[in-house]
Amino acid sequence: MKILVPIRYPLTKNSRKTLERAVELKSEESAEEPVDLHVLHVDLIQDSHKVRREDLRREVESEFDIDATYVVRKGFLVEETILEEVGRRGVDMVLIGKTRSSRLRRVFDRLVSNNPDIENFLKDNLEVTIEVVD
């Protein structure tokens, strides 16, 4: 099973929870069904931090014992970049962290379309399993 694990860099609390779940899934692999993890960071064009794949790998592996492929993609929209990466890698599952924001912030973001609902966007546009880590 191929699993895409989009996270933020530097790692956030939610990114760490998502990686913990990825490690759990990897530990459940078997010879009949190996688990292939692809850790993705979307470096937003409009707010680029010029993240390198090696930076991402180093930070993740400093905290987790994880065997994964590391990918950094530049993109304007996180959800579109994840969608493209799913197609590019042919994954079976996307493991995403639960978005946390205040109620007022969610209302404001919805009004100005500033903070998309990545979970629903992916569910509406993909035919793979989406697991949300809370």
Image (cartoon, rainbow, N blue to C red):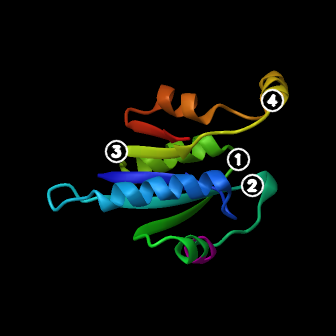
Question: Measuring 39% from the left and 52% from the top, which residue is drawn there?
Answer: 3
User: In which image quadrant can residue 109 be found?
Assistant: top right
Label 2 near label 1: C-beta < 8 Å?
yes
Label 3 near label 2: C-beta < 8 Å?
no
| Front residue of this view, candidates 25 and 78 | 25
In the rendered view, tell whether residue 128 sits above or below residue 1.
above
Q: Secondary structure at mark 2?
A: helix
Q: Tell me the CA gap for discs 2 and 3.
A: 27 Å
Q: Secondary structure at mark 4?
A: helix
Q: Which residue is mark 2?
A: 45
**Mark 1 or mark 4: which is in front?**
4
Query: What amino acid does circle 3 point to?
Result: Asp
Q: Which residue is mark 3?
A: 92
Q: Which residue is mark 4?
A: 109
**Which label was assigned to residue 76?**
1
> Mark 4 or mark 3: which comes first in sequence?
3
Question: Measuring 63% from the left and 51% from the top, which residue is drawn there?
Answer: 14
Q: Tell me the CA gap for discs 1 and 4.
A: 17 Å
Q: Secondary structure at mark 3?
A: loop
Q: Is residue 111 left or right of residue 85?
A: right
In the rendered view, tell whether residue 111 sits above or below residue 92.
above
Q: What is the tally of numbered marks visible in this picture?
A: 4
